[in-house]
Image (cartoon, helix red, strand yellow):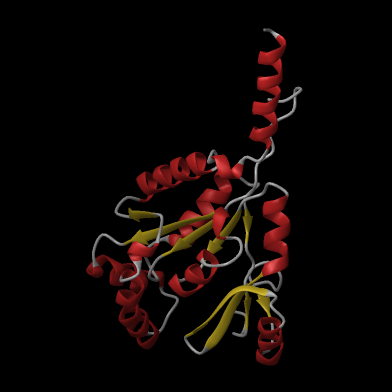
């Protein structure tokens, strides 16, 4: 505490990645339920909205020409081409959030994660990869959702190993064999990472105040 006020911290860019069906969407939702101040990065996409999805809340739905223009103008923090559609994270709202001390959560694949990890904001990145307990369980989860056709599930399973092969590019890796236990570990990681010295610029002023107080007692 400094003068009765909390030491300001910078926000984290929290990246969650996994193959489809490994639980990242569920864990992302639980993380935000735990701390509602965590903002979800609303991706822009060229795919059509699915039933129940709201523009600006679930995704920002844009045309392909508009998406490419945003990329050309440097307005995307990351972008990728997945299953025939473009996805990307608008840069401005992310920078505004972390400069204001708010964490931003990204539910993205390894391509997007790699771009953010090498961006100008890389010093504030916390990257976490979720592994399924087995390939058999991964397929069972995809089939049990009842949201995709057999062909889509087949494509997602084919892509799963490509996703899994990039696990070692992340700061943390969690095997999601028990959802509640994985959630608890995830919260522990976020809590610890918020206390990194690089995330607390106000600590410098606090240390200076301590030094001044110390010198004054000599």
Q: Position of residue 101 (x, y in %)?
A: 68, 46
Residue name at image x 55 percent, y 60 percent? 122
Q: Position of residue 32 (x, y in %)?
A: 57, 50
Residue name at image x 65 percent, y 34 percent? 204
Seen in the picture, residue 169 relative to 59 is either above or below; the reply is above
Task: Report the side of 198 relative to 110 (left or right).
Answer: right
Q: Quadrant of residue 208?
A: top right
Task: Report the side of 98 relative to 23 (left or right).
Answer: right
Q: Quadrant of the C terminus?
A: top right
Q: Quadrant of the N terminus?
A: top right
Residue name at image x 38 percent, y 70 percent? 19
Q: Quadrant of residue 5?
A: top right
Q: Position of residue 196 (x, y in %)?
A: 53, 41
Counting labels gives 0
Taking depth in this image into account, of 155 and 89 the one nearest to the observer is: 89
Residue name at image x 57 percent, y 84 percent? 86
Q: Position of residue 34 (x, y in %)?
A: 55, 43
Seen in the picture, residue 107 relative to 207 is either above or below; the reply is below
Seen in the picture, residue 64 relative to 77 is either above or below; the reply is below
Seen in the picture, residue 189 relative to 217 is either above or below; the reply is below
């Amino acid at each position: 505490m400094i003068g009765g006020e909390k030491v300001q911290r910078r926000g984290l860019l929290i990246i969650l990645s996994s193959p489809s069906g490994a639980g990242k969407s569920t864990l992302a939702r639980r993380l935000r339920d735990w701390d509602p101040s965590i903002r979800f990065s609303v991706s822009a996409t060229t795919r059509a909205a699915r039933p129940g999805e709201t523009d600006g809340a679930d995704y920002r739905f844009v045309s392909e020409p508009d998406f490419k223009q945003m990329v050309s103008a440097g307005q995307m923090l990351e972008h990728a081409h997945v299953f025939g559609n473009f996805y990307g994270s608008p840069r401005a709202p992310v920078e505004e959030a972390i400069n204001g001390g708010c964490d931003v959560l990204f539910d993205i694949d390894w391509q997007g994660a790699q771009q953010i990890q090498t961006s100008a904001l890389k010093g504030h990145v916390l990257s976490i990869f979720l592994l399924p307990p087995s390939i058999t369980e991964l397929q069972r989860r995809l089939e049990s959702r009842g949201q995709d056709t057999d062909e889509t599930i087949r494509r997602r399973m084919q892509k799963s190993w490509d996703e899994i092969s990039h696990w070692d590019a992340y700061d943390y890796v969690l095997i999601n064999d028990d959802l509640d236990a994985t959630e608890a570990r995830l919260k522990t990681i976020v809590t610890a990472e918020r206390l990194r010295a690089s995330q607390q610029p106000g600590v410098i002023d606090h240390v200076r105040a301590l030094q001044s107080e110390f010198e004054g007692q000599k």
